Image (tube, rainbow, N blue to C red):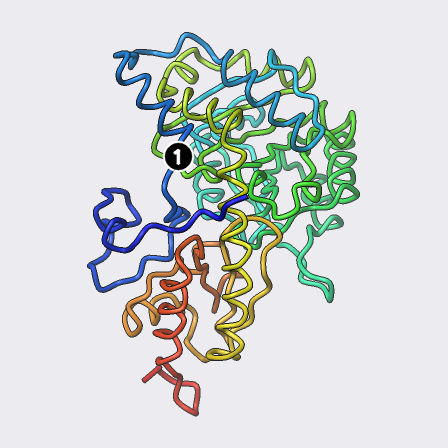
Amino acid sequence: MTKIAAEPLSALRARTSYKWQTYPADVLPLFVAEMDYPLAEPVQQAIISRVLASDTGYIAGPEPVAAAFSRYAGRTWGWAVNPDDVRVTTDVSVAIVECLRQTVPMDGSVVVTPPVYPPFYELPPEAEASAVEVPLLLTGTGWQLDLPALEQAFARGADALLLCNPHNPLGLMHSVETLRAVADLSAKYGVAVISDEIHAPLAYEPGDFTPYLSVSDAAREFGLCVTAASKAWNIAGTKCALMVASSDRTRLQLDSMPDEVAARTSILGLHATVAAYDDGGPWLAGVLASLAENRMLLAELLAAELPEVAYHPPAAGYLAWLDFRGLGWGEDPAAVALEQARVALEPGLRFGRLGTGFARLNFACSPQVLTEAVTRLARVRATPSGGAPV
């Protein structure tokens, strides 16, 4: 297995994506979840071959990517997915909205578990529902879902739960026991569970990840999985995501969606995703090897240069949830990092009220860029009184 190296800054700054066009060239962009690695060759070739064939029309159906995902899920997690139960759409956010439209009544409520991926607050209103917060618990052994509080929310009439599995921004993988408990509560109260599993291929130990629909009959009865190859293979712009059902109830929900939900999927994204799931394994292993080194390098850098910043390496993904409260940088340390260190982080406030004093850092970059970013941050210090940084 060969590690995949990040591209040099000179090449990265030529990219036209959101990550590289948002800030001036003196800013190190470690905010949005885009990686700095070159695309996997099978993915590149899949896209190029379709373009050379002038095959850029509408998709004919989900069959190729459904079969590829079924093979990948069985090979990676031992999860038997029937390809007939897989549908496609443009991206996971759209998948969530469309699933909510099928499972939540107008003016219904959707549970989110902060600190959590910011669009989780925006997607329920798009489906004419409201978001209800049930914050994660921070215990002596780490973060976890607050099951008693979830039950209270379900008993009060919540219609659905948006489950982030693995959880963004914490890189938390929920245990089988926790997922089964969620499924039991879901069945008890008739609450739909939409499990966003987009970060699942980025588990450092693939055996530690558990697909929600694999845990029990209760999970399969009321649960839907939404996922994509976009985070793991860095192909968000190719626009292809998957929705997976496992019961007559949820199959009907997917089949009740307008035809346009699937028709908007990119044919280039479909073929790129097939290539990722079928032939992108060696590349992903190389990326994970680089990410594993970076997640520990970040711990070493922080311990040496910013010991006031608390960090727990994630079990999945390339996003670090950093606690800056020990530095006295105020409610939004990302603003300080950008203004004074010229490092762009994702503001913790966007992840809910538990994000006050936190920021998210993307370490899917070169070790040199990561080292420079922490060095810049370390130059910024709070005043002894905890006032404005100087």
The residue at 40%/78% (across/down) is 378
Placement of the C terminus among the 4 image quadrants = bottom left
Q: Farthest residue toward the bottom?
A: 384
- Image: 306 above or below 137: below
On the rendered structure, is 41 left or right of 248?
left
In depth, the one of 104 and 15 nearer the eye is 15
The residue at 39%/46% (across/down) is 37
On the rendered structure, is 346 left or right of 53?
right
Question: Residue 99: image x %, image y %?
Answer: 53, 25
In depth, the one of 389 and 125 nearer the eye is 389
- Image: 177 above or below 333: above
Placement of the N terminus among the 4 image quadrants = top right
Disc tally is: 1
- Image: 164 above or below 353: above
In depth, the one of 368 and 201 nearer the eye is 368
Helix, strand or loop for disc 1: loop
In depth, the one of 88 and 1 nearer the eye is 1
Q: Farthest residue toward the front?
A: 1
Q: Which residue is mark 1?
A: 235
The crowding category of the residue bearing disc 1, from other C-alpha atoms within 10 Å (few below 14, some 14 to 19, many at least 20), is many
- Image: 368 above or below 114: below
Question: Residue 342: image x %, image y %?
Answer: 28, 68
Question: Residue 385: image x %, image y %?
Answer: 43, 91
Question: Residue 307: image x %, image y %?
Answer: 52, 79
On the rendered structure, is 122 left or right of 47?
right
Kindly identify the amino acid type of the residue bearing the numbered disc 1: Ile
